[in-house]
Image (cartoon, helix red, strand yellow):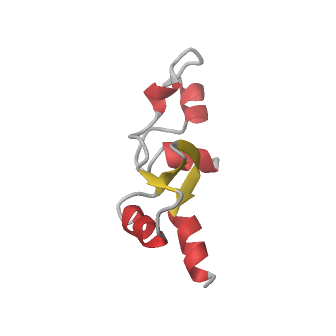
Amino acid sequence: MFAWEKVIQPAGSPPHALGALFTGQAHLHDTIERHTSDPLPMIGGGQPVSEAVALLEKSDAALVLVDGKPKGVLTRQDLLAHLGGR
């Protein structure tokens, strides 16, 4: 499974996109939206790490916005690695 599939497909959800294609649960003409989970929570790139900690207590990942535009995805693992390196 690719890292992006872990974000899109939470544990217990239907098979990841490639597996769904092989099993007939997904088709190449399907929209992406049909095979994704709820949107990720968002956090501003200038917010303190403490806000990311609070946000990631409830979610496995968050979309990071800079100047209102998506800049990247912050995962719990990213945050733990950062905090563990201190």
Farthest residue, direction top? 29
Image coordinates of residue 40 in percent, x first then y, are: 43, 46
| Residue under the image location 42 percent in, 63 percent down | 56
Farthest residue, direction bottom? 86
Image coordinates of residue 75 in percent, x first then y, are: 53, 60
| Residue under the image location 56 percent in, 52 percent down | 73
- In terms of depth relative to the viewer, which is nearer, 29 or 23? 29
| Residue under the image location 52 percent in, 26 percent down | 32
Location of residue 85 (image quadrant): bottom right
Q: On screen, 74 above or below 20?
A: below
Left or right: where 63 falls relative to 78: left
Image coordinates of residue 19 in percent, x first then y, are: 58, 34
Image quarter hosting the C terminus: bottom right
Image coordinates of residue 23 in percent, x first then y, are: 54, 27
- In terms of depth relative to the viewer, which is nearer, 36 or 74? 74
Q: How many marks?
A: 0
| Residue under the image location 52 percent in, 18 percent down | 30
